[in-house]
Each structure stands twice: as structure tokens, then as C-alpha cells.
Amino acid sequence: MTSPTTSPARPTSEPVAVVLAGAGARGAFEAGAIGRLLPALADQGRTPTLFCGSSAGSINSVLLAAVAHLAPDVAAKEVTEQWRRAVGGSMIRSVGLAVPASAVRYAAGRLHLPLPPVELLDPVALRAVLGRWDGWDDLHRNIAEGIVDAVALTATDLTSDRTVVHVETRPDRPLPPDDLDRGIVYRRTRLGLEHVYASSCIPFLFPAVELPNEDNVPSWNVDGGVRLNVPLKPAIDLGAERLVVVATDTVSRPQAATGNGVPTAIDLADQLLHLATGDRLLEDLRTLTQVNQLVKAGASARTDSGRPYKKLPVLVAAPELPTDIAELVAEIVGAAPGGPLAPLARALTRVTGLPGTATPDLISFLLFLPAFTRRAVALGEQQADKLLDSPDDGWQE
């Protein structure tokens, strides 16, 4: 990791949490947005000390926690460069290697040989790519030294049908109580590659990850976005008093890209995906607004854990229009180095009979190519700049 050019700014106000949604390759947008926001937050005396993420948001959470000891501008560059250069081609190559391996596993299963198929893609090559990242020592040290209060990664426990929040924090910081009504449980752990992989393990594409539960009994975990794509609740439970939320769906309706003509199966898949990734966030933000209004009006109440409700200012960075990210895909599929993808995109459109823009919108979740991630980083930076130019630097109650 890069050495800091100056000492990192220390928080001078209430604890600030960065909450990062699940988004696949759209995580590049998140990296661009939070990278631009980090120096501004430091100038405000609001350096984040809590990082909560699901799926691709879990990747960004560990990246941010690992560079928290650096000067904000250096930390921002470290995170965005990971998406600009490292994730792209190597991730695509690893998936390419996984396809023939999966074909062999499938054939073996059909012949009843001792290599049964598990899911559509073999995870070995993908794990190798994620495993090349060397920031774990920095992450653990930043938590131990108090630069970071906690890192929380969500996963969906198929064994118990709950959202499991894997939390690394100092031993003297208690974990929040489980919220059984919402199906959220907290587990103290030393985070590692398996937790990131479990949080970002897309169902049907990659096999579930085996992790021990609270009784040290194996449980099976998949993508945290299945049940809790934007982990606002864990961030609040961990003590956040300000929230920086970075999502890749617009926070107004409509959320999904729309087309003309008779809806197809791909249109439906697009709508369902946005329902899973965006609708819960809209409902959570609406609830948070209502609580803020009640507290401002003088209402007094306590949470299930006994803490009094407080106003929680929120800074939300998200695309402005539902087609913003889909348009990035449209830009690159016909131009180098995205050119080779153009025939595939056109073929998919013809096969599905799709009249609208859902195809590039769906592709954006899996397009781990530098041609896309660079543009997505830039889009995140542009959106963050607009936020910082708005009243109160984008903070809202």
C-alpha cells in the first residue's frame, strides 16, 4: 500500500458510516463517488470510521478500511485505481477460465462421476483474483489502532434464512444485539477473503460459501444483497450518527431502465433486479426521513436496544437517471476495447426480442472490463461533485 503524504484527518464530530450497496461491476461507480467524497468529508471533520457493505459494497468496504490510515486524497486514489486497473481484465479472464471448468464439472455430473456440478461457474479462478489483494494487514491494523471502528460485511445465510453481518471490530467494542424481527444477526470475526467472497457470491452463478455460525457449526452463505442490499440498519446499530450511502440505483422512481413495446423476459428480469437492489433502499430512506421528522418535532422513543432515537443526517450518492449506467454500456460495446462485446450484445438483443435498454442495464452488473469500470468511476466522481455543490454539501435529514 502507498504511504500517506500527510497524516489522515481524524474525525472531530459524530461517528460517520459509509454504507455501500451491492452492485457487481457497478461497484466502480461507488468507488468513484466515495473517492471524491473522502477529502471533502475530512475537510468537514467527518472522516468515516465505519464501513458497511453488501456484495460489491463489501469489496469497497474492505478497500476503504485498508487505506483509512492514508491521507484522504491518497486513499481515494488507491480505491479508484483498484477498479480502474486491477479488477477489469483479470476478472473477465478468471470467469473465462471458469466456463470450461464448469463444463467439465457438468459433464462429470451427468456421467455420475465424482465431480458433480455445483453452479454455473467454477469459483477457483475468481478466488485467485480476489486473493491477490494484499491489504488485509493494513485493514486489521487500522481496526486495532482505532483508525477504523468497525467493518461489517453482510451475507445471506441459507441455513437459517437470515442476514448475517460479519463484523471485525476491537474486542472492547460490543456487537449490537441481533434483530430477529428483521432476520439480522451479528457475528464477530477476523475478516478475510472468504467473508468478501460469501458477501458477493451471486446465487446460481457461484456456489454458496461455507462459514461457521455462532455455534461453530457450518452454514452456507451467499450474496448479502439477496436480503439486505444496502445495510443501513447494521450501520446504525454499530453507532453511526451520520450516514454516507452510495448506491447504483437512482433514489427516485422509476429506478429501472424502461423500453417500448411488449415487455420480454429480459425486461422482467431487469425490473426484478432493480426491485431487489433499489426498492428496499427507498423504503429505508423514507423510514429514516420519518424518524428524523418525529425527533425534530420533539418525539421521544427508544430503539429495541434501548438507545434513544436521534436525527441521522444522510448523504446519498447515486445515479441521477435510471439509464445513466446503461448508457455507459451502450458507449463501450461498439468501441475498442469493448468492441468484441458488441456482437454478443446485439445477438442477445435479437434472441430476446428486446425493444428497450434493459439488456445493457443488466450487462452492467457483470461487465468487469476496464472500458466500463473507468467510465463508471468517472460517473461516480461526477455525481459526487454535484452533491458537494448542493446546499449543505448534500447532507439531508
Image (cartoon, rainbow, N blue to C red):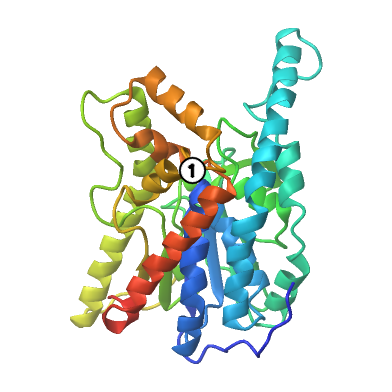
Is residue 238 or residue 319 the one in the foreground?
Answer: 319
Q: Is residue 63 left or right of residue 181?
A: right
Which residue is pictured at 53% across the width and 88% down the height?
Answer: 11
The N terminus lies in quadrant: bottom right
* Residue at the farthest left position: 297
Which residue is pictured at 69% across the width and 38% down the height?
Answer: 93
Secondary structure under the numbered disc 1 in the rendered image:
loop
Task: Provide residue 391's location: percent of width, then percent of height.
Answer: 26, 81
Is residue 355 or residue 153 the one in the foreground?
Answer: 355
The C terminus lies in quadrant: bottom left
Does residue 101 sit above or below 140 in this rendering? above
Task: Provide residue 17's location: percent of width, then percent of height.
Answer: 49, 73
Task: Provide residue 288's location: percent of width, then percent of height.
Answer: 30, 67
Query: Where is mark 1, residue-wise?
Result: 365
Is residue 144 or residue 271 the one in the foreground?
Answer: 271
Does residue 98 sit above or below 276 in this rendering? above
Q: Is residue 325 visible?
A: yes
* Residue at the farthest right position: 114
The crowding category of the residue bearing disc 1, from other C-alpha atoms within 10 Å (few below 14, some 14 to 19, many at least 20), is some
Which residue is pictured at 46% across the width and 62% down the height?
Answer: 378
Does residue 102 sit above or below 292 in this rendering? above
Which residue is pictured at 21% across the width and 26% down the height?
Answer: 261
